[in-house]
Image (spheres, helix red, strand yellow):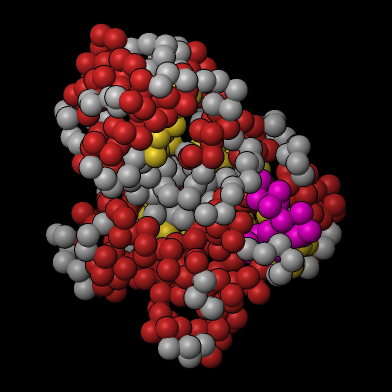
Amino acid sequence: MIMQKFVNRKEELSRLKDAFKKNALVIVYGRRRVGKTRLLVEAVKDVPHLYHLCKEEEVNETLKTLSLKLFRLTGKEEFVRKPVNSFEEFLEALPSGVVLILDEFQVLVRNHPRVLGVLQEYLDFSQRNPVVLCGSSVSMMEELTGYGSPIYGRRTLSLKVEPLKFWHIGEFFPNYGVEELVKTYAVLDGIPEYLLRFDPVLSPEENIRREFFGRGFLYSEAEFLLRYELRDLSTYNTILEAVGYGNRSFGEIRNATGIEGSKLPRYISTLIELGILRKEVPVTLKGKEKIRRRNARYSIADNYFAFYYTFVHPFKEEIELGLLEDPLENFERNFNRYLGFVFEKIARQFLIELNKAGKLPFRFSKIGRWWHKNEEIDLLALNESEKKALFVEVKWKELSEREARGILKDLKRKSELVGLEGWEEFYGLVVKEVEGKEELRGEGFLVWALADFERLISPKGEV
């Protein structure tokens, strides 16, 4: 395993340390490789703790290992001579105030289901320690703490560890420019272990060829993760490949996959729950309109999965045979277009950071895409109480001033279709590069290019 670099996570660390002071039950979960264990190691660095990684083994072996850790923690040889023979005895022997971390907890529950009842009794009557239950099976961890579970309602903190934001990945690649970081994020998202798989001496394209088309670690990782969570892998592969090809509506996905309309929602819901697919509706919709299927569009939320199902999985047979001409030609021809979709995600993060820092004409309370029939606006930020709106187009292109003015003019036209009469409206562009940026800003337009991202990528992350 690659040792993970610890980047950011200040808010998560603060919340964990506060919970430890209260002898809380803490649930930590998130997809594999996202850095949960590294976060926990950092959080208990200066406090007494007992960390245990749950394995596929007999319960007696688990108890022997826990006894040895009690010996190392307390120095009492009795735990070596006579190991604890139950989880009740282990919890009773655990010194007061020591943080107990059970990593991959769902494995322990699968092998020894009654541990949940033991924990319930401990939490209700005997708790003297902060307890952290950590797991990579997102669906199982949510089920273990849901209604009907013995430990339902007893957690103090539930912490889902998310991938790093775009602004933090530069710490892994100090010699990369902003454009190279966009390409890297488009392939690896903010997953620390994946970021460490790329060689910072090589270009993003060289790393991609080595890791994916050269059948490195990242080549097989996507399906490994899906097998960890899902059974019917072929159906999910079919859905993800269809979305990777650009099928966004329910009807398009149904037609592309041939899956019955009555069965498809269940598969889509599962992928959404796992954080792999994202469902989106126009940001202006409210109430029942938000849940109607005809208003929704779907996309692959995780950049790593998006890249894999766009460029790798459709050519898996050729890659396995070493016939790389077609896969590489497809990658080189379409990668820049793919970056355009990811750049919208980065632009949204950028506007959110500006919003937090008060660097926009108003503070928005919601942001998202807008569309109606064949008309689309990449990002629309709204403050509904003040009736203010920011319309933004995102272009992964180098624009002339004339092209930029044309896009802004069309943006104004589309804004009239949204139906925000009486609102104060602002218009903006987020682009790769643009001529006449200052002139456009002088006329009241909000215009940002890659060069404006530099301050956020700096170690201080200042806007």
168 sits left or right of 122 in the view:
right
Residue 431 at least partly seen: no
Q: Quadrant where the C terminus lies?
A: top right
269 sits left or right of 183 in the view:
left
Location of residue 304 in the rendering, given as x and y in whole percent from the top left corner: 49, 61
Location of residue 125 in the rendering, given as x and y in whole percent from the top left corner: 25, 8
Q: Which residues are magenta?
A: 168-184
Location of residue 384 in the rendering, given as x and y in whole percent from the top left corner: 51, 31
Q: Residue at x 85, y 53 (%)?
A: 439
Q: Majority secondary structure of the magenta segment?
A: helix
Q: Does the magenta-highlighted stretch encompass residue 178?
A: yes
Residue at the front extreme?
81
308 sits left or right of 235 in the view:
right
Residue 229 at least partly seen: yes
Q: Residue at x 51, y 88 (%)?
A: 324
Q: Residue at x 21, y 22 (%)?
A: 118
Q: Residue at x 43, y 49 (%)?
A: 32
Relative depth, front residue between 364 and 452: 452
Residue at the top extreme?
125
Q: Does the magenta-highlighted stretch encompass residue 155?
A: no
Q: Quadrant of residue 138?
A: top left
Relative depth, front residue between 357 and 391: 357
